[in-house]
Image (cartoon, rainbow, N blue to C red):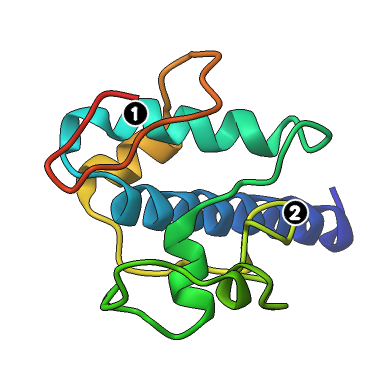
Amino acid sequence: KDNADLLEVVDKALNELIADGTVASIVERETANDAESYDIASVFYNRVTNPNVMTMGSDATVYYAVGDFLREKTELTQEDLESDSPYNTRKAGGIPPGPICNPGTYALYAALDPNDTNYHYFVYDRIGKEP
C-alpha cells in the first residue's frame, strides 16, 4: 500500500476510536451502575444506526451542550433542548464531535462491545434501573 492508503486506514481507525470514546463518555454520564452499561451502550448504537427513527437523544449531552457539566440543573428547559450545539443529541444527528467526560472502564468496554439488543429506550434513575 502507498502512503495515501495507509493514511486513510489510520484516519478511519482514529475516527472509530474517537466515536467509541465519545459513546463511552455518554454511557458514563447516563448510567447509574456499571451493570447496565452494556445495555445502555446498545440503546445509543441502535438509535444512531437508525437515524430515520430517532436521534441519539441523550440528556447528558444536552447538559454538556448548555455548559451544565456537573448537572446542577434538575431539569432541562425547552430552550436547552433547542440549543444549536453539535453536542445536543436531542437535535443533532449522529455521535457528537467528542467526549463529554472521562469514561470509566465499564463504559469503555460497553461502548466497544455493547449487548446485542433491540432496545431504543431506557429509564434513567440515579439509583439505577434496568433499560
Q: Amino acid at mark 2?
A: Gly
Circle number at residue 49 = none
Q: Along the horizontal axis of the image, is 11 left or right of 100?
A: right
Residue in the picture at 44% in, 72% down: 63
Q: Single out the residue that lies furthest toward the bottom.
A: 67
Question: Compared to 79, does 3 lie above or below?
Answer: above
Q: Quadrant of the C terminus?
A: top left
User: Depth check: 129 or 103 in front?
Assistant: 129
Residue in the picture at 48% in, 50% down: 23
Q: Amino acid at mark 1?
A: Tyr
Disc 1 element: helix
Q: Along the horizontal axis of the image, is 43 left or right of 124?
A: right
Quarter of the image for residue 101 reads: bottom left
Q: Nearer the viewer, mark 1 or mark 2?
A: 2
Question: Compared to 51, does 26 lie above or below?
Answer: below
Q: Single out the residue that lies furthest toward the top.
A: 117
Quarter of the image for residue 52 reads: top right
The residue to which callout 1 is attached is: 38
Counting from the top left corner in percent of width and height, residue 92 is at 73, 61
Counting from the top left corner in percent of width and height, residue 2 is at 87, 55
Residue in the picture at 53% in, 77% down: 65
Q: Along the horizontal axis of the image, is 130 left or right of 6?
A: left
Disc 2 element: loop
10 Å crowding of disc 2: few (<14), some (14-19), many (20+): some
Counting from the top left corner in percent of width and height, residue 11 is at 71, 60
Counting from the top left corner in percent of width and height, residue 18 is at 55, 59
Q: CA distance from mark 1 to mark 2?
A: 22 Å
User: Depth check: 47 or 78 in front?
Assistant: 78
Q: Earlier in the sequence, mark 1 or mark 2?
A: 1
Residue in the picture at 33% in, 45% down: 108
The residue to which callout 2 is attached is: 93
Q: Along the horizontal axis of the image, is 57 left or right of 109?
A: right
